Image: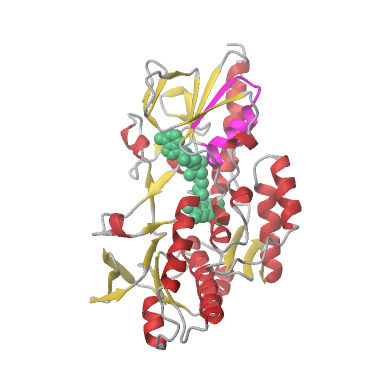
Amino acid sequence: MSHHKARICIVGGGFGGLFTALGLTGVGDVTLVTSEDHFTFTPMLYEYVSGEVEAWHIAPRYKELLDDRVRLIRGDVTEVDFAAREIAIGGRVSRVAYDMLVLAVGGATNYWGIEGAEEHVMPFRKVAHADALRQRMIDTLDSIPPDAAPQDARRAATFTIVGAGASGVELATKMADLLHDAFARRGLRGEPRVMIVEMGGQVVPGMDAEIRGVVENALRDAHVELHTGTRVRQVLPHAVGIEHNGQQSEVETSGVIWTAGVKVSPLIERLDVEKDKRGLVVVEPTLQVRGHKNVFALGDIAFYKDVVPSLSGTAQLAFQQSGLVIDNIQALLDGSPPGAKHFVELGEAVSLGTESAAVLAGGRVIDGALARQARFALYTSRLPTWQHRLRVGASWFFGGKPPRPLGL
Ligand SMILES: Cc1cc2nc3c(=O)[nH]c(=O)nc-3n(C[C@H](O)[C@H](O)[C@H](O)COP(=O)(O)OP(=O)(O)OC[C@H]3O[C@@H](n4cnc5c(N)ncnc54)[C@H](O)[C@@H]3O)c2cc1C
């Protein structure tokens, strides 16, 4: 098959799919089908909530990243017909035919079947979710009378974050800083209440022990209440039911933000391919879907055996895997055998409030304001396309912007 005629269809424009499309631009007849009109650099979604970065920094439109050699279709793929080599897209009559297919649709929020969760919690995976959360904090603050008693102001400004993984602690420290700042600016008495509810026994499980120590201190400094060994039983419109050591209680809350789990996307649930017990698509070491030599899967939807546990379900992994998919599609088009690769941990970085972060690089942990700058520099280098990196790098000059107070 000649390179230029090969129809390569990539489904999903996140870390796995977008970087694959960028790497294959010009190699074949490339089509990217994806739900939204922009990429999302999720590791900086917290900074977007706090206004330290803007949407154009972390959620550039595909039109700005891809040139016209990539055909862009905005839509949700609803079905893959492996026999006919076609995909169906919601709302479109005509199907898209492919010679090579890359599946990179990522995960979806997992509510674990908890009563009321799907209806009442705020998920946190997209720019739209971050916008809704910021607005919820502003609306909550606006509803507190200036002369409210400290305990009433605190009750009104209670937010509950479910999950103490990196996402939960990054979000909690950011929200706590923003809400404390807003209390001071508005002259409100007392202090806001930000709590994390975590079923397990510790924060950031799987991360380096030294980073964990830094994270625990940061949570204390930010006055974030940490409830480990605590299970969410039920979510109501303005309250959350929890259980700790068999004791049940209900906490009034202005928002429950869910960072406690990912499940496979509905498209993958429907796909008739071999999967592991979590529903992930089983791939060969070449990232080819088992039994389908011309179909690749990567990122959050793929079960890849040779990977350290802390890497699975990360942007780092999806990004590295895109390099292997690019090489292997080129190899197949050249008539060469596809290869395998060992993926490595590229370091850990956690944002801790609006002034600080913790970064593990080269076996050393740094924290504080310097780590915040290092994290910005690191993430600038991971953004897609050198043109976008340059624009963002010039705009941030390593430190981002000061946070934007809530309501301004
Ligand atoms: C708030 C947050 C913070 C995170 N922070 C970090 C971090 O600091 N470091 C890290 O390594 N990882 C982080 N992650 C995890 C990381 O975002 C994921 O592991 C990574 O995005 C997975 O890449 P992916 O390509 O598999 O999927 P995604 O990046 O999720 O991309 C999937 C794409 O597919 C599209 N799509 C979905 N369904 C369909 C469909 N049916 N048809 C067409 N398109 C579809 C989606 O719109 C999306 O564009 C974070 C995740 C979140 C939510």
Expressed as whole percent of the image width and height from the top left, the position of residue 248 reads: 23, 75
Q: Is residue 273 left or right of residue 50?
A: left
Taking depth in this image into account, of 1 and 222 the one nearest to the observer is 222
Q: Is residue 228 left or right of residue 347?
A: left
Quarter of image, res 143: bottom left
Expressed as whole percent of the image width and height from the top left, the position of residue 249 reads: 25, 77
298 shown above or below 375: above
Taking depth in this image into account, of 143 and 319 the one nearest to the observer is 143
Taking depth in this image into account, of 76 and 8 the one nearest to the observer is 76
Expressed as whole percent of the image width and height from the top left, the position of residue 388 reads: 69, 43
Quadrant of the drawing holding the N terminus? top right
Quadrant of the drawing holding the C terminus? bottom right
Look at the image and say whether residue 24 sits in the magenta stretch: yes
Residue at image location 51% in from the left, 79% down from the top: 183
The span picked out in magenta is 13-33
Is residue 306 in view? no
324 shown above or below 403: above
372 shown above or below 322: below
Expressed as whole percent of the image width and height from the top left, the position of residue 336 reads: 61, 19
Q: Which colouring convention does the figure follow?
A: secondary structure
55 shown above or below 232: above
Q: Is residue 142 left or right of residue 317?
A: left
Residue at image location 37% in from the left, 84% down from the top: 152
Is residue 121 in view? yes
Taking depth in this image into account, of 327 and 394 the one nearest to the observer is 394
Number of numbered discs present? 0
Look at the image and say whether residue 202 sits in the magenta stretch: no
Residue at image location 30% in from the left, 75% down from the top: 251
Q: Is residue 18 left or right of residue 196?
A: right
Quarter of image, res 233: bottom left
Quarter of image, res 226: bottom left
